[in-house]
Image (tube, rainbow, N blue to C red):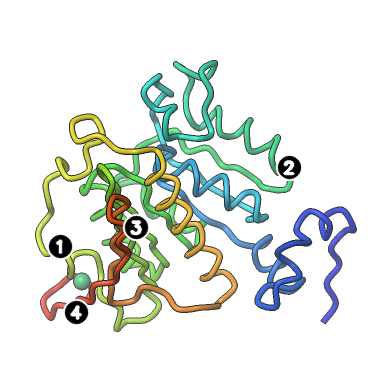
Amino acid sequence: MKYNLKKNVIERYSRQIILKNVGVAGQKKIINSKVLVVGAGGLGCPVIDTLSRAGVGTIGIADQDKVSLSNIHRQNLYNFQDVGKFKVDVVKKKIKSINKYTKLIKLKKKITEKNILKIFKNYEIIVDGSDNFKTKFLLNKYSIKYNKTLIVGAISKFDGHVFTFNFKNKKTPCLKCFYQSMPSDDLLNCESEGVLGSIAGIVGNIQANEVLKHILNIGKDLKGSILILNLLSLNLRKANYSKKKKCICSK
Ligand SMILES: [Zn+2]
């Protein structure tokens, strides 16, 4: 098979192309991939940053918020001058300066039951960078329905959680199998609970890493387990859970 990547494109990605697991063929896969990132906040920013640098061809960003001063300590795509501007507008400009080959699609809207199909059909991989369980459960439900890969992240204080679901595999348990009922958003509330910028960067980059692994079809994913990080104790562990018989993912 012949891969015609321009010389400057090869140079741009040369440090990852030399990885045996990537190569020119893998880079082509990355360039042809389409990823939806829901939320351009503490998790979304590092996800979008890393994926655009890696060469992901199309990134959709769903976010309707404006940048606030209290975002900047952890949301690394924004500067002081961006306060008051829509996040998707700022991100589009920023990514253009990082990697002109990444097509950024702005979705200045909340994802709902009504618009989700229209949005989802353009993407294979969905990254959850939301700060509420209602959105996480909605993404879970429709990722099951449309056989998407969903990568969920959650952060609070010094703690982080990551889930990876590949719903093409019908044996994969889902987010609801783990939580069963919707937890309170207090668990994710950076405003009341506080959060360190570093945990957002670390969890977001783990999510980006999961995306790249999925695109390249390499490594092991978190099927049937949750990755739990605590940065105070530097504890990193996986906890297994099983598919529930009466769950929405079993129907
Ligand atoms: Zn389930």
Q: Amino acid at mark 4?
A: Ser
Instruction: Say above or below: 160 vs 163.
Output: above
For mark 4, what is the residue? 242
Which labelled disc corresponds to residue 100? 2
- Tell which circle, 3 or 4, labels the residue nearer the N-terminal end: 3
Q: Please state which of the two labelled residues, at mark 2 or mark 4, is closer to the viewer.
A: 4
Spatial CA span between label 1 and label 3: 13 Å
For mark 3, what is the residue? 152
Report the side of 60 relative to 197 (left or right). Answer: right
| Residue found at x 28% / y 73% | 225
The image quadrant of residue 75 is top left
Q: Amino acid at mark 1?
A: Tyr
Report the side of 21 relative to 110 (left or right). Answer: right
Count of numbered labels shown in the rendering: 4
Ligand number 1: quarter of image: bottom left
Label 4 neighbourhood size at 10 Å, few (<14), some (14-19), many (20+)? some
- Tell which circle, 2 or 4, labels the residue nearer the N-terminal end: 2
Between residues 56 and 146, which one lies in front from this camera angle? 56
Which labelled disc corresponds to residue 179? 1
Which SS class for mark 3? strand
Q: Position of residue 66 (x, y in %)?
A: 41, 23
- Tell which circle, 1 or 4, labels the residue nearer the N-terminal end: 1
Direction right: furthest residue: 7
- Tell which circle, 2 or 1, labels the residue nearer the N-terminal end: 2
- Quarter of the C terminus within the rendering: bottom left
Between residues 121 and 33, which one lies in front from this camera angle? 33
Which SS class for mark 1? helix
Q: Position of residue 156 (x, y in %)?
A: 25, 44
The image quadrant of residue 92 is top right
Spatial CA span between label 2 and label 4: 42 Å
Spatial CA span between label 2 and label 3: 27 Å
